[in-house]
Image (spheres, rainbow, N blue to C red):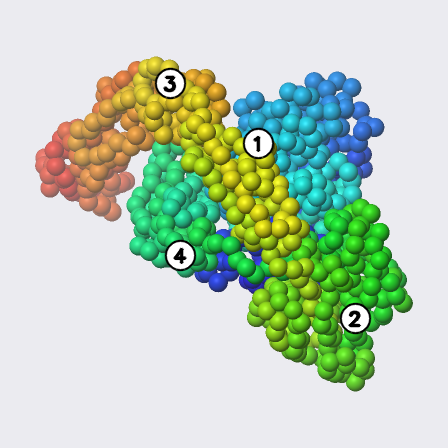
Amino acid sequence: MRGSRFERAAAARTRRSPSPLRSFAVAVPLLIAVSGSAHAVNPVVFSIFGDVPYSTSELVDLQGNVSNHNLYSPSAFLVHLGDIQSGTEACQEVRYQQVADTLKTSEVPVFIVPGDNEWVDCANPAQGWAWWQTYLLGLEQGFCGIWPVEAQVARPENFSFLRDGVLFLGLNYVAGTPSSVVQADADWVNAQFAAHGAAARAAVLLAQKEPGGALFDAVVANGRAFGKPVLYAHGDGHAWLVDSSFFGEPNMLRVQVDRGTLAHPPVEVTVSVDGQFLFDRNPWPPGTPQIVRPICSDQPSLSIDDLFAAEGQDAVFTLSLAGATGSAVSVGYATQDGTALAGQDYVAKSGTLSFSGATTQQQIRVPVSQDAIPEPGEAFVVNLSNASGAAIGRGQGTAVILDDDSGPTSTTGPVLREAVTGGSENSSVVTTAGPLGGQSGDLYLAAVASKSYVGVSSVSGLGLTWTPVRQQCAGRSQTGVALFRAQGSPIAGGTVSANLSGVPGAAVISVARYSGASSSGGIGSVRSVNTNGVSGACAGGSDGAGYAFDLTTSAANSLVFVAAAMRNRDHLPGAGFSEVAETFAGTSGSAAGESLAERLLGAAATVNVNGSFSATVDWAVVAAEVLSGGAPSILSVTSSAGGSVTLNPPGGSYAPGSSVTLSAVPAAGFVFSGWSGALTGSANPATLVMDANKSVTATFASAPGFTVTVQPTTGGSVTLNPPGGVYASGTSVSVTATPSAGFAFAGWGGALSGTANPATLLVNANQTISASFVAQFQLSVSTTGTGSLSLSPAGGLYAPGTLVTLTAVPGAGASFLGWGGSLAGTQNPASLLMDANKSVSASFTTVYTLSVASSAKGSVVLDPAGGVYAAGTLVTLRAVPIAGYEFKSWSGDLSGTLNPATLVMDRSKSVTPSFRRLRR
């Protein structure tokens, strides 16, 4: 997988033709480089759509999108963002049922959040909500292979789960949401980030509408403190929108999807290894190969998650059991080195975990070492093996260790803030598919490529003046690239368009926005190349599979920006360069393609600009030096005892004019009391503009404690971790219920609910909790004779009302005689209701064989029939001669002429009958 700023969707499936509607957005800078590890964290791929069907006829669109998703999408799951009817339709029960039935035809789990049209906008909202709950609440639970999903007790339509280190939250937020529901949404966001934020590398929030009120405040506050990539995806607006400025935080992105008709299939979203979000709006263009999914089994399945862990902390893996049946499950685990080494970076661990009863999650804690050496991120894995009672669905979890020892750096330069692309076919205009943010002083670079090559006459957008930097045709004019720049004070954010001098078959545009660039033009050295050489001619060239040329920069901290036009080929930047975006329009040989790449240089130098293509092609490249805005500004931060300060962006060294968010983080038992120095007041987080070297001090004070009281319980005990019962506000306490002998844990009460054990309690007031335990009944079993007895469910301890199936299994040479104790008779298997302590015995006896020699003159009838008998059985033998013969006598273990005769089976025996011809 390429170590670029954007992961390719092709990394997750067979490569397909470039998509004309693929668009990209940068969420945050690269978190950590782990692409060199053999055990990298996996990308997460899922699909989103909404606002369909808006009529009975659009049920066909809904089914079509689900069917195509089954055929072509590699996504792990599908999310419907609400509105299952139009605002002009009357709410009718049949629509809820039809939508549910259609979504259930998906081959991957489907999640759904409510929309206003089927709830608050109904003539009878209560009836609409009742129908929604009947047909759509918990829809995902009906799918084979569904993983553990948590639901909010107060609003069970709000859900959450972790998948490959990404936290997903579903929210009930629509136009006209009641205030109590909005507050429940905010509480859910607060609780889930508190419980899972440390283990997540990114977060995705899903709702019908963009957030407002208390929900907006909760999303912003948690996203800012989280500091890692956050995506809020919603419908409602019926048009594609990528908005990086909505939340005002550099790590947070809002996306609005098109209305999900057949013309707008579900958007495929990839959360890449480095935390970026990639959006594919045309996920199955013509020629897309059909996906092959493994057969889903209803057998219980074990899976382990991925996570990030800081030095000095435990890496806590969560092992989940899906499809639990109540039977015992066990699995072995062991750590394995990646780039992180046992004994040096972490403590090796191995062992066995067991699941029983209602337990569906276990944790594996691996201590991570602390050192003072600045180093790149390192990774190790935990492997699952030797599972009993369940299959291993995902058997390897990766932990990425984040280094906390890097200090400020003196190198700065232009910083990429976003990149947005677009495409067109058979048009003289090409426009970005989404808007760019309008930021005063930032440098905007627009690159335009076409097939076949036509020049770019002008670029417009954002209220800025766009100036050409360089245009370069390919060596055979099959494509070409034009680079334009703009800088100043945008009127507002918006799209950017290029006017072409002709009408090509296809064209693409990519616009990148940089902060920290020089305000006096922003561009230094420029060079362009095609297969005919530097500033090559537009004819006579031959196709090539790569390029390499030198560009000499003129100043320190410059960034080399590369725009490559390559038709329908993938582009791989050379060593030292990172890809910013890659986009295509058109299909097959008629496609126009373009890639942007960058490289930051600490000092003026001659750099080799190089890259390669997936196959030979007629190409053109423009490389330009983006000048730095000046020397970095240094931010020095100190804090009093009782807390620390985090910076976003981190590092302490910033381009002039950069905005830095400072978050004061109190330690347990302390509260933040205020800023001093270049910041004043007590706002937390607070933002500082780096227009000079600055210093800030954060002061903390002892916090009043809140008490957590555990009510007395019968049948078990409750422990708190950390112990003590008095905690600073915001402390997360792990609460564990431990049943006494003969009891089982049944659930939480008071400030906790549900049955998760251990559970996490966020302390923000004096709180009381209780645990309920139910008595268990003992089933004692014994056997006499040769044989064994099996129980289902296994174990011998059962909750009241459990129906236990007992099966008697005779040993070799034995048979089952019957039950004793709390069971009677000979039915096998037999069932027993556990409403008290009970005991059961199973009796077995040895069996003997009676062999009778055959004769052509007659036969022998046995009563009882069969020839195999329990010890002591009395068997009657009757000799039956054929016509013309008479019985003569017995021999072997029976003698004499008595017919019928009897024989006692006290050992295995054999008998021979004799017959003679009748006298005439």
The mark lying in front, picked from 3 and 2, is: 2
Quick one: label 4 or label 3, which is nearer the N terminus?
A: 4
Mark number displayed over residue 710: 3
Label 1 to label 3: alpha-carbon separation: 35 Å
Mark number displayed over residue 682: 1
Label 1 to label 4: alpha-carbon separation: 34 Å
Q: Nearer the viewer, residue 231 or 39?
A: 231
Q: Residue at x 45, y 18 (%)?
A: 766
Circle 3 crowding by C-alpha within 10 Å: few under 14, some 14–19, many from 20: some
Residue 825 seen in the current view: no
Circle 4 crowding by C-alpha within 10 Å: few under 14, some 14–19, many from 20: few
Quick one: label 3 or label 2, which is nearer the N terminus?
A: 2
Q: Residue at x 89, y 67 (%)?
A: 502
Q: Nearer the viewer, residue 664 or 88?
A: 664
Q: Nearer the viewer, residue 562 or 383?
A: 562
Quick one: label 1 or label 3, which is nearer the N terminus?
A: 1
Q: Secondary structure at mark 1?
A: loop
Q: Are marks 3 and 2 in contact (CB under 8 Å)?
A: no
Q: Residue at x 85, y 66 (%)?
A: 456
